[in-house]
Amino acid sequence: MERDQRVNQTETDYSKRLHLGKRQTAFVGVFLVVVLLFVSTFCMGVVRGASMEPTYLDGQVVLVRRRTPLSPALSRNDVVLLQRDRGEVIIKRIFRLQGEEVKPGYPYLIGPARTRALTDYYEQETASSPEGRTIRYSVPPGYIAVLGDNPSISEDSRYFGPVPIASVLGTVVAAPGPPPIAPDLRSRMTGPAATQ
């Protein structure tokens, strides 16, 4: 009888360990699937330069949702990472989408475009109005116009025209605060050298 109880206890312990092992294996499997989905959907980027200040600072890390055929459609004011010529990756805000009119006023996309001979990159339509003949510019199909948040130093669609939607690598979805400044650096920055 005592032997039967020990056998039953051993079988119960074995069953519990087997059940626990199955649960641990399932947990590890689910964890790996979640990590794989995260890594294939998101990536990290580091902002370089001051063209997106004050929104994003130089050295700040951003979380980017990669562009895939299943990604949501781009919209105005999305902050995106773009692949430029020569492999350079830049961060900019979408100002106008394909087919949207670009007015000649602020942020002066068309004025600088004229001086740089970029107006050919925008769709042009001549319209008659009481003031006379005017030319309307719009972003061509398959392209977007982008701007930096710091217009005084940003090189954006005002300088290189609209960019292909295909060059969008992803959309910024989150960004922690700016990188902290170490206390010893902060004390050095408050001295006379910081004002130069």
Image (cartoon, helix red, strand yellow):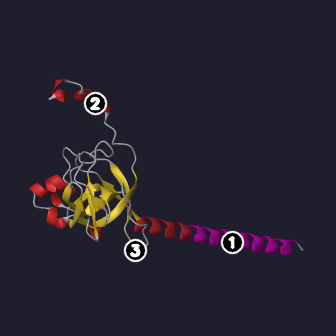
Q: Which residue is mark 1?
A: 19
* 127 and 2: which is toward the camera: 127
Which quadrant of the figure has residue 23? bottom right
* 128 and 62: which is toward the camera: 128
Q: Amino acid at mark 3?
A: Pro
**Rendered view: 177 above or below 40:** above
Q: Which residue is mark 3?
A: 69
Secondary structure beneath label 3: loop
Few, some or many residues within 10 Å of mark 2 (<14, 14–19, 20+): few
> Which percent across, then down, holds residue 37?
46, 68
> Which percent across, then down, holds residue 78?
37, 57
Few, some or many residues within 10 Å of mark 3 (<14, 14–19, 20+): few
For the residues marked 2 and 3, what is the alpha-carbon distance in whole angstroms? 45 Å
Q: Which residue is mark 2?
A: 186
Q: What residue span does the magenta drawing correspond to?
A: 2-28
Secondary structure beneath label 2: helix
